[in-house]
Image (cartoon, rainbow, N blue to C red):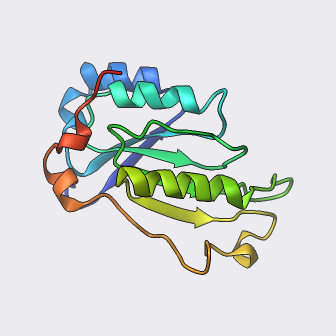
């Protein structure tokens, strides 16, 4: 069903990279299948980005949810979309606005679409999803989805 967009999200970026190079190689280049990793903190989340970047996927995204701490500088080379959100439900840990602004600003500088999902909390609907008085609903450009762009090429460090 190539008229649908599928978002495949994992915490096991190395396994995804390996599968996209072997058993799922045909799916890696499909424009309607987007591949992403969860990034919640520096210790566990940030290292997953390198595994995602090494995957031969046409569209790569980060789901930074729940954002649990300041992530500092993020290398967004080869990343086509970033989603950010706070933790929700009972026992939800608070998310600092400065952490969200840092990621938004890094996305803007790198020309990576930024989607702000929610502030989170016990009553996430009450907290809303506005950041500085507006919503952020960006998605990857159709040109990136249709064909590999310069930004989707893995760059050596």
Instruction: Please state, as top left, top right, bottom left or bottom right, where the C terminus lies in the image.
Output: top left
> Could you tell me if residue 89 is visible in this image?
yes
Can the viewer see residue 23 in this picture? no
Q: How many labels does the image show?
A: 0
From what the image shows, is residue 75 above or below residue 13? below
Q: Residue furthest right?
A: 91
Q: Nearer the viewer, residue 20 or 120?
A: 120
Dividing the picture into quarters, in which one does residue 126 lie?
Answer: bottom right
145 on left or right of 96: left
Q: In which quarter of the image is the N terminus?
A: bottom left
Viewer-proximal residue among 17 and 40? 40
Q: Residue 68: percent from the left, percent from the top?
A: 72, 45
> Which residue shows up at 63% across the image and 40% down it?
71
Residue situated in front as seen by the camera: 152 or 32: 152
Residue at 22%, 33% in the rendered image: 153
- Front-lying residue, 9 or 156: 156
The answer to whether residue 22 is above or below residue 148 is above
Residue lying farthest left? Answer: 147
Residue 30 image position (x, y, % from top left): 19, 43
- Which residue: 84% across, 57% down? 90
In the image, is 81 to the left or to the right of 88? left
Residue pictured at 52% horizontal, 47% vertical: 63
Residue 53: give x, y in percent of width and height.
36, 30
Q: Residue furthest front?
A: 109
Image check: 80 left or right of 133? left
- Residue 60 at what x, y percent from top left? 35, 42
Give the residue at the far bottom of this rendering.
Answer: 133
């Amino acid at each position: 069903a190539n008229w649908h967009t599928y978002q495949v999200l994992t915490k096991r970026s190395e396994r995804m990279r390996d599968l996209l190079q072997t058993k799922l190689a045909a799916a890696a280049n499909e424009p309607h299948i987007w591949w992403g990793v969860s990034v919640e903190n520096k210790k566990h989340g940030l290292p997953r980005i390198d595994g995602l970047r090494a995957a031969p996927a046409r569209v790569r995204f980060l789901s930074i949810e729940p954002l649990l701490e300041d992530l500092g500088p993020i290398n967004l080379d080869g990343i086509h979309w970033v989603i950010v959100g706070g933790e929700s439900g009972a026992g939800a840990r608070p998310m600092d606005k400065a952490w969200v602004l840092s990621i938004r600003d890094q996305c803007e500088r790198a020309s990576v679409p930024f989607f702000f999902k929610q502030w989170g909390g016990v009553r996430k609907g009450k907290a809303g999803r506005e950041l500085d008085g507006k919503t952020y609903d960006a998605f990857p450009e159709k040109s990136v989805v249709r064909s590999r762009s310069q930004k989707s090429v893995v760059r050596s460090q």
